[in-house]
Image (cartoon, rainbow, N blue to C red):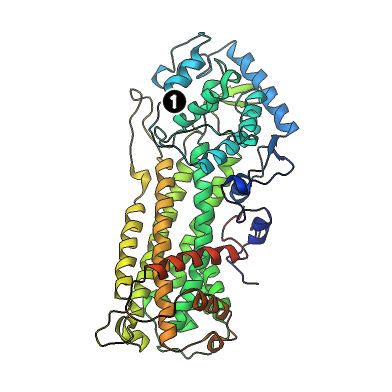
Amino acid sequence: MIGGFSKMGCLGFETGRRRGLWEFGGGADHTVRMEPVELTGAGLSPLEAVALGQRRTAVRLSDDARKRMYESAQVVAEVAGRRPVYGRTTGVGANRDVLTSDPEHGARLLGSHSTTGTTSYPKDVVRLGLLIRVNQLAAGGSGLDPAVADAIVGLLNDDDLPDLHRGGAIGTGDLGPLAELGLALGDVIDGTSALPLLSSNALTLAECCLAYVEAATLINVVPLVGALSHVALRGNAEVYDVRVHEARPQPGQIRVARRMRELLEGLPLKPARVQDPFGLRAFAQVLGPAVDHADALGNSVRIDINAAAENPLVAGDTVLHNGNWHAMPIAIALDSLRLSLHSVATLSTTRVANLVDPEYTGLSVFLASGAEASSGVMMIEYVAHDALAAVRSAAQPATLGTATLSRGAELHASFAPQAAVLTKQLLDALREVLASELVTAVRAIRLAGLTPDDLAPAPAAPWLTDALAALPDDLADRSLREDLEIARGLLTQWGDRQVEHPAESG
């Protein structure tokens, strides 16, 4: 079995696969009925959350969670009888000091806060967001009655998902879409329970979970592509020697180097150079930070999907007003991951440049075949740099934004929702960059006349067998668009076959 960037405590790929993470899509034909899974407010990982959403597994509120919610509802009702409680007996935002006993306060709050943009969230995001909100409520800090969680569970189990819209979320709570959810829940939300429902970044966290799983999967296939480029360029494996990385023990770098040693172990090809170009020589040093930042994102999201990040927070016999709605931890994690993946994409394009250069391969210019002045894969390099430009645009830190809202009552925002959207965009473009490298590396290997047997016993050989079988062997000048599409699909298949994810280290 082929290993990944495993660490102690990792949730292995096979575990995720048994849970259906990769086997069930979003269509009705893929619905699987299972015994309800209890949501307890603790112990839910991003991978497990995504798996539950994709499988449409029935869920229920655990008995302990129900008790916690009931008790917290009693506490907040008692406290609100003797002092102001934000959003329950007061207005919100700049109206925080305006007292109200209007029984329609909650309905007005939901109505006004349901102002959003016009773009709907995808259904898989809505489903996952609702599941996350129930799990957060199960932690017992909201003061909401368990009937509210039961109503959301009903929507999930009946697959009766409300149409929730983007717009208005800037990393200080997904106010707009959660207000829409409140309206969809009907009478179970009363004048005192509207604001507590909104005190969450559940939809943003849903997109973070999905982005994390995709990023972790894609990061895990980068060494496979890099190993084939190493073969095509006849790289020097000294760069992965354990002593090199013990001398500079950066965690992600060590894990990448170990993975590359596994893939290239026993490779019988003689290195072409004493010292390779950066694309090979700095492979572990550049991919390593992305592995570390994937860990950081997974761990940050894991905390928040199990957190009672409520404002106000019911804690014991009191109510505490606080700033746990601020999504800066996940926003920073997303920004950091994108910046590190930008460098991964940049280094991939340098390997493409090396692969089309006879100085590095000893093959024809642009890996052309046939008539003189043929272009070969010349345009692949353009496609790769077009995708790299998209990566670069999406890598810009969302946390550089500023906001002054509600008459100065709210002077800062994390812009985590925007960071999540940018991360999805970047991952799509990064897949295009890696597909470009894969097509180019496999073509160079074909032109060099190498076969998987020539790589044996190196574990990279079976991956080359896959690539040679999947990609067309026609080396004449032609459109390579289909090759790139096949390569993108191959990257997805390879991600599904990895043993373990690089993160989930909690």
Q: Furthest-left residue in view?
A: 373
Give residue 441's position: percent from left, percent from top.
Answer: 42, 78
Q: Residue at x 67, y 18 (%)?
A: 74
Q: Is residue 442 above or below residue 159?
A: below
Query: Mark 1: which secondary structure?
Result: loop
Q: Residue at x 50, y 61 (%)?
A: 218
Relative placement, left or right, of 131 versus 68 is left
The kind of residue tagged 1 is Ser
Camera-nearest residue between 497 and 482: 482
Q: Quadrant of the N terminus?
A: bottom right
Q: Tag 1: Cα neighbours inside 10 Å, few (<14), some, or many (≥20)?
A: many
Q: Is residue 55 left or right of residue 378?
A: right
Q: Residue at x 40, y 52 (%)?
A: 425
Left or right of residue 167: residue 312:
right
Give the residue at x 61% y 32%: 155
Foreground residue among 28 and 84: 28
Residue 492 at x, y = what percent?
A: 52, 63
Locate residue 316 relative to residue 412 in the image: left or right: right
Image location of residue 45, percent across then percent down: 62, 48
Which quadrant of the view contains residue 70? top right
Q: Is residue 230 visible?
A: yes
As displayed, is residue 60 above or below residue 53? above
Residue 124: % across, % down: 53, 43
Residue 235 appears in the figure: no
For mark 1, what is the residue? 114
Q: Nearer the viewer, residue 182 or 82?
A: 182
Label tally: 1
